[in-house]
Amino acid sequence: MNTLFIADLHLCEQEPAITAGFLRFLQREAVHADALYILGDLFEAWIGDDDPAPLHGEIAAALQALQNAGVPCYFIHGNRDFLLGKRFAAISGLTLLPEEQVVELYGRRMLIMHGDTLCTDDQAYQEFRQKVHNTWIQRVFLALPLRWRLKIAAKMRERSQQTNRYKSAAIMDVNPEAVEQALLRHDVHWLIHGHTHRPAVHKLALSRGEAHRAVLGAWHREGSMIKVSADAVELIQFPF
Ligand code: LP5
Ligand code: MN
């Protein structure tokens, strides 16, 4: 009996080894779990459910197969795939969750999220995030021809990589107060998130007692998952 969490796979046609690793993970590992939670950035960039990229169909079919085998699959949006919508959810069987969700697993209440909202020191990112989460801006973007959307997304990725080179590691990590407030807001002692690509399980000494923050790793050269069971919360890195 265990529940699995993954995030930050950044799947794209240019990285077939990661896709192959993910498909193997679904068939060999996730199929034995009680549920799979994907905490954002499953895809490198999502520009709308009408994108006909063959990769999307392949991933949808694999997720649907997992659920047909009896494993429910949940998704929280990341900063790369926040436009993933109802149409893809329908074909993949994914249940879309809000950006913060509390799950009760084997007697533990755990808060789960992508993690980008905790990076409050990164003001440039938070301003950018506010704009691209605006419903009207999203509607206009989604109404653009696919070619334009691809170009804009590529430009955004390029700019993001450029600006990140000049940001300090501390700015791009979570803000400890934002973490504490999130734990308080939901009255939990456990948090699982991704986004920062710094896999670790941190023990936190809060004024109201001990808490834990488990951070998923990105799938660059190996896979990363968190396995929650009645006995333990394990962060596991594994080869593709
Ligand atoms: O993603 P990552 O790890 O590189 O960096 C993130 C933050 N960057 C982003 C930007 C995404 O990578 C872009 C994804 C495109 C998604 C598909 C397009 C959908 C468009 C929808 C429009 C409604 O999230 C980065 C953080 C980092 O995490 C760590 O937390 O620092 O933040 C930034 O890079 C923000 C920059 O500081 C400023 C943003 C520059 C973007 C400028 C846009 C230019 C657009 C040109 C259009 C013609
Ligand atoms: Mn992210």
Image: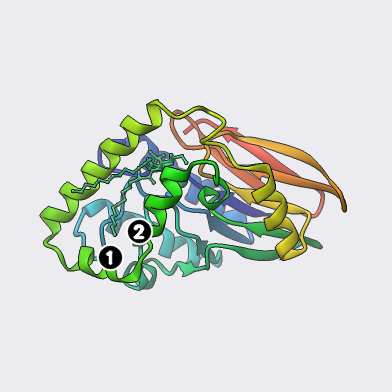
- Indicate which disc, 2 or 1, sits on the residue closer to the N terminus: 2
SS at circle 2:
helix
Amino acid type at circle 1 is Ile
Q: Tell which of 43 and 59 is nearer to you.
A: 43
Q: CA distance from mark 2 to mark 1?
A: 7 Å
Q: In which quarter of the view is residue 60 placed?
A: bottom left
Residue of label 1 = 137
Q: Check the picture and name the quadrant holding the N terminus.
A: bottom right
Is 53 on the left or on the right of 64, as rendered? left
**Residue at horizontal 28%, vertical 37%?**
159
Q: Residue at x 47, y 44 (%)?
A: 123
The image shows residue 31 at horizontal and vertical percentages of: 55, 55
**Residue 9 visible in the picture:** no
Q: Amino acid at mark 2?
A: Lys
The label shown at residue 131 is 2
Q: Position of residue 58 (x, y in %)?
A: 30, 55
Is there CB contact under 8 Å for labels 2 and 1?
yes
Q: How is the image coloured?
A: rainbow
